[in-house]
Image: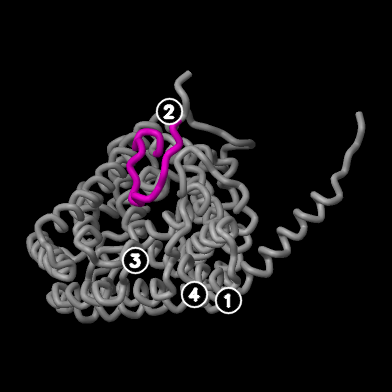
């Protein structure tokens, strides 16, 4: 066997790594800093809404302001994450720099006045917008622009959730169902790690979730151990998670299309959506489903939140359904913000209910629902499996021996498979495999 070393190829690969290191480090540092500012601001507007719940009644006016801002200044930025994905597939008009400040302001308006939305979409748009700006300064070609924008997605995602590995995988997995381009993997990993570390360096923390089941399960296991009865329950739950993700996606897109058909003036759509949210809140006599839903308002400590869903009795039978309705109305009517954190809430609340119905550990099922509904709604099962490890391992070094990782993989991949090609991102493409 003849050993061959292609010296030129080796040099070329090293140049590729150092080139993208030089591009990604400053770009991702900027993204991490802006995301830190966004998260700090989001915490403050959330607290402001908690202390002044009457702000909800100004939501229609806030919707008009947000909608008019985008109508006058947004242009192509209105397309949000879909624009970034489209520009990766077919570089053309580019991602405007104004996307970053517009989405930051728009999301803060949504949360200040009580809209039910998330933050991932905001962070990804900040990442894509800032990276695109750097790309224009550097006059990169189309191939490098694709890598750059993909890295921007990774930087924003890794920074906002504190999951650098999942951020890198998500960025290349979300573009096309059934195909992952590894050309951008190293730049994405660089960007996601730097974005996360810079965000952390600014003192912005990430939510920690308790999965006590992992500790108790690992105490009786000497190696990776599966409870086959529990595995069956996880598979059943995964089917429910997949169907729920389809329901979320189709309802969100359906509401969006209905608003566009019936209300011709774009900036009036969020106003009507705001009025619907007020009516829903009044009908339920409950504000649990407004805002991010991550923590409880100190004035209502028994509220249903993502955190509470990890404990027995932490969610009502239909908490997942109401969060789904509130979020699809918010986002579908044109308010700005992400969909992912509400998907976490929906999945964790549904997991809490299924844990009770299936006689399974509630915290385990909440954790699986947390990532599996997201996997089904974005067609990113691998990224979500890795996210489960990154989010939940910090307090549980015993996750591997407990079998949690395998349960997470089963839940995420089954949810993705059963959800079909439904996706919150319409610009996502699918590879059609040839029939056997």
Quarter of the image that includes the N terminus? top right
CA–CA distance in space, label 2 to label 4: 40 Å
Provide the residue designation for mark 2: 229
Q: Nearer the viewer, residue 5 or 113?
A: 5
From the viewer's perspective, tell me whether residue 50 is left or right of residue 229.
Answer: left
CA–CA distance in space, label 2 to label 1: 44 Å
Q: Nearer the viewer, mark 2 or mark 1?
A: 1
Provide the residue designation for mark 3: 76
Task: Measuring from the top left, give residue 270's x and y in whole percent.
Answer: 17, 67
Residue pictured at 45% horizontal, 56% vertical: 210
CA–CA distance in space, label 1 to label 4: 7 Å
From the viewer's perspective, tell me whether residue 95 is left or right of residue 251.
Answer: right
Q: Nearer the viewer, mark 2 or mark 3?
A: 3
Q: Nearer the viewer, mark 2 or mark 4?
A: 4
Q: Is residue 186 visible?
A: yes
Q: Nearer the N terminus, badge 2 or badge 1?
A: 1
Picture layout, residue 162 above or below residue 54: above
Provide the residue designation for mark 1: 201
Say the numbered circle drawn on residue 288: none
CA–CA distance in space, label 2 to label 3: 51 Å
């Amino acid at each position: 066997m003849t050993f061959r070393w292609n010296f030129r190829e080796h040099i070329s690969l090293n140049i590729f790594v150092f080139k993208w290191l030089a591009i990604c480090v400053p770009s991702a540092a900027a993204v991490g800093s802006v995301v830190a500012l966004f998260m700090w601001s989001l915490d403050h507007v959330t607290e402001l809404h908690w202390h002044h719940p009457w702000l909800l009644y100004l939501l229609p006016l806030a919707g008009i302001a947000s909608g008019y801002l985008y109508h006058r200044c947004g242009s192509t930025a209105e397309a949000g994450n879909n624009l970034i994905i489209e520009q990766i597939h077919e570089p053309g008009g580019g991602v405007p720099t104004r996307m970053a400040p517009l989405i930051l302001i728009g999301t803060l308006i949504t949360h200040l006045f009580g809209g039910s939305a998330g933050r991932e979409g905001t962070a990804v748009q900040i990442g894509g917008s800032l990276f695109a700006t750097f790309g224009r300064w550097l006059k990169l070609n189309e191939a490098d622009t694709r890598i750059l924008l993909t890295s921007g997605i990774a930087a924003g995602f890794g920074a906002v959730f504190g999951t650098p590995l999942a951020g890198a995988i998500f960025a290349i997995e979300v573009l096309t169902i059934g195909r992952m381009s590894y050309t951008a993997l190293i730049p994405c990993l660089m960007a996601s790690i730097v974005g996360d570390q810079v965000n952390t360096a600014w003192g912005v923390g990430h939510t920690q979730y308790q999965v006590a089941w992992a500790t108790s399960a690992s105490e009786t296991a000497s190696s990776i151990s599966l409870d086959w009865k529990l595995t069956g329950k996880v598979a059943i739950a995964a089917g429910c998670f997949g169907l729920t993700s389809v329901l979320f996606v189709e309802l969100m897109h359906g509401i969006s299309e209905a608003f566009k058909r019936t209300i011709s003036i774009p900036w009036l759509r969020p106003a009507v959506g705001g009025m619907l949210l007020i009516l829903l809140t009044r009908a339920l006599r409950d504000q649990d489903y407004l805002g991010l839903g991550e923590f409880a308002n100190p004035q209502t400590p028994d509220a249903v939140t993502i955190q509470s869903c990890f404990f027995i009795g932490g969610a009502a039978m239909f908490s997942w359904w109401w969060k789904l309705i509130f979020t699809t109305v918010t986002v579908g009517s044109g308010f700005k913000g992400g969909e992912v954190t509400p998907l976490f809430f929906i999945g964790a609340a549904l997991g809490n209910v299924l844990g009770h119905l299936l006689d399974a550990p509630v915290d385990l099922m909440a954790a699986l629902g947390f990532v599996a509904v997201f996997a089904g709604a974005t067609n990113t099962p691998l990224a979500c499996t890795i996210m489960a490890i990154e989010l939940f391992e910090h307090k549980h070094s015993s996750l591997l021996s407990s079998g949690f990782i395998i349960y997470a993989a089963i839940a995420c991949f089954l949810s993705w498979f059963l959800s079909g090609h439904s996706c919150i991102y319409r610009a996502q493409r699918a590879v059609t495999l040839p029939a056997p």
